[in-house]
Image (spheres, coloured by chain):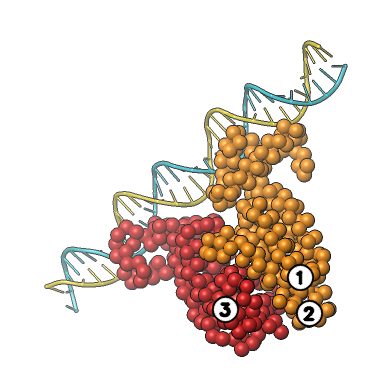
Chain colours: A red, B orange, C yellow, D cyan
Amino acid sequence: MSDVVASDGRTIGRRGAATRRRLLDSTAALLVSMPVRDLRVVDIAREIGTSPATFYQYFHDVEEAVVVLAEECGDEMAPLADRLVAEWSGLADARSFVDSFISAWDEHAAVLRVRNLAAQEGDARFRELRRIANGSFIEALATHVRAAQRAGRVDPDLSSITAAAALMSLLERMAAFHADLEALGSTRDDVVDTCARILYQTIDGSPR
Amino acid sequence: MSDVVASDGRTIGRRGAATRRRLLDSTAALLVSMPVRDLRVVDIAREIGTSPATFYQYFHDVEEAVVVLAEECGDEMAPLADRLVAEWSGLADARSFVDSFISAWDEHAAVLRVRNLAAQEGDARFRELRRIANGSFIEALATHVRAAQRAGRVDPDLSSITAAAALMSLLERMAAFHADLEALGSTRDDVVDTCARILYQTIDGSPR
DNA sequence: TGTACATCAGTGAACGCGCGTTCACTGATGTAC
DNA sequence: TGTACATCAGTGAACGCGCGTTCACTGATGTAC
């Protein structure tokens, strides 16, 4: 829907759109088992039984395909931010949010990891995608903090926006990382619980 | 000191050791301005006015040179963990630690970023280096948490090791990330303060 | 102190692999009448 | 309902760049006597 024109100028019909979709899916699938830098146009094409030349009809290079995938991930994560807008009545709400967040990440882990890796390396496109995706989360967290500050539950000297960004970093990192932690002895519940506590006590005060 | 033998079997003398060092320094310098994947043996060699063949006398490939650099960084960060072992008397101690940690990171940011990126991508060597480097920090943090739990300042249900790992993730991420946050309006002090508060309230309880 | 030899150090030039990319073509699908 | 034409879609095969890597060599340094 975003593209109506292939790289050689021909308009894309149903069949073409389907092929483009299969190329995207094959890219996502391969990213699960190998780093982006090892991902070759040939591999993506071969995965769906087509030739590299086909790939170039729909994408300029591998990165462009990954950008599209990352956009899609961002869109799918967006609704979760609404869960942060509502007032929380206790630690249980935080746990439930963290649990959903981590689950959503798990579904798109490969692509989101690549997006964040590329963003950290300074790639402008991926930085922007990440900024957009995280923006609504950070805003909602910061609003929470300010409310708690007005209510006297959080120190007014805390920078709400910095705290929100820090918590978002923590959430993303733990979401990307929890499988490793579990290998070291923490359970998934430990991870969720720990994140929820840190989140809750920072944005809503009153740690117990 | 670790290597006494070049890749072709000849033992390394003073002159050779100096060249190896210059190759390492040139690698580190180039990493500041470009991602690892763009780093070519030719570039590293040219930077110190030598030929690619020289590089291969000391390292099998670029990654091997980066591994050595990452090891060195780990060694230089290690003393900082001692600052975590001592009991803290207040938030100011946490601020001072975070400030030192971020400063130390800044000095080696390029190499540490590459190490963490590669570790996240699953490279075994870099994962191990990171585990070793972060291990003493995580242990010290977990010890803190357990002490606070015994003293009744932190909920005994919190998993001390998970909390310690989460905080370490946060610290690393903010250290790698603080320049971007500053571009968005937070000051460096905000970053230090926010990390210190989250750290302090999580491992020592009593947020105020 | 000087000479000869051994070993360490550095390099120019070339080979070749692997991949990105393209082009000219065949085949599939859609549409007008 | 069928035929002709236009356009969409896919591809085999090849070209060529860029880089990793090596080899046979020259030059520098060290050491034995």
Q: Residue at coordinates 54% horizontally, 85% vertically from top-left?
A: A86
Residue A187: percent from left, percent from top:
71, 77
The earlier-in-sequence mark between 1 and 2 is 1
Q: From this viewpoint, is residue A189 visible?
A: no
Q: Is residue B51 above or below residue D10?
A: above
Chain to which mark 1 belongs: B
Foreground pick, A3 / A120 = A120
Residue under label 2, please give it.
B153
Which-is-in-front pick, marks 1 and 2? 1
Chain to which mark 3 belongs: A
Query: Which quarter shows the N terminus of chain A?
Result: bottom left
Q: Is residue C14 above or below residue A33?
A: above
Q: Give the number of the disc on residue B90.
A: 1
Task: Please rate how many residues cluster around mark 1, counting C-alpha atoms within 10 Å: few if below 14, some from 14 to 19, many from 20.
Answer: few
Residue sticking out furthest to the bottom: A89
Which-is-in-front pick, marks 3 and 2? 3
Task: Please rate how many residues cluster around mark 3, counting C-alpha atoms within 10 Å: few if below 14, some from 14 to 19, many from 20.
Answer: many
Residue under label 3, please give it.
A146
Residue B54 lies in what quarter of the image? top right
Query: Which quarter shows the C terminus of chain A?
Result: bottom right
